[in-house]
Amino acid sequence: MDEEDIIEQLEELVRRFGIEIRYEPISLDEEGISLVGGLCKLRGEKLLIINSKAPARDKIQALAKALSNFDLDQIYIRPAIRGLIERAATTRKLITASDSAK
């Protein structure tokens, strides 16, 4: 399965939760800062914004991280895709724990 197939499958899952996905060019004036995007709420609706300039692996990570916020237990997801989402959830929890320790 190539990166584009993975992105398509993750996008389909995100849309099943009623979340709109927007690919927008995100640029920062600061060199060395990379912003991929993330899940947000706009006018009460969930929206996933992803940097259209980001490499495919970063887009996959942003999609998986967004999906890690939802209960996926009752949905069949290919094992490789589920593994990506579970790793994103673990990473998100580790980052949250380290932020609260500061």
Image (cartoon, grey):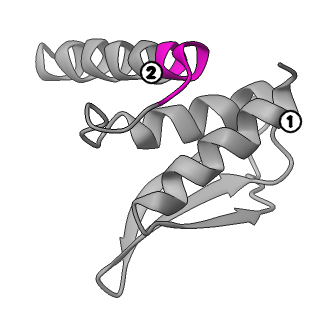
Question: Tag 2: residue type?
Answer: Ala
How many labels were placed on the picture?
A: 2
Element at label 2: helix
- Using the image as rendered, state which of residue 30 and residue 40 is in the foreground: 40
* Picture quadrant where residue 24 is located: bottom right
- Using the image as rendered, state which of residue 66 and residue 9 is in the foreground: 9
Query: How far apart, in angstroms, are the residues tagged by discs 1 and 2?
Result: 18 Å
- Please state the extent of the stretch shown in magenta in the rendering: 77-84
* Picture residue at 60% right of the left edge, 13% below the top: 80
The numbered disc on residue 4 is: 1
Q: Is residue 16 magenta?
A: no
x and y, in percent, of residue 37 in the image: 59, 49
37 displayed left or right of 90: right
78 displayed left or right of 39: right
x and y, in percent, of residue 44 in the image: 29, 83
x and y, in percent, of residue 12 in the image: 61, 52
Q: Nearer the viewer, mark 1 or mark 2?
A: 1
* Picture residue at 53% right of the left edge, 14% below the top: 79
* Picture quadrant where residue 23 is located: bottom right
Question: Tag 1: residue type?
Answer: Glu
21 displayed left or right of 5: left
Circle 1 residues within 10 Å: few <14, some 14–19, many ≥20: few
Tell me which label, 1 or 2, sits earlier in the chain: 1
Q: Is residue 82 magenta?
A: yes
Quickly name the residue at label 2. 88
Residue 47 showing in the rendered view: yes
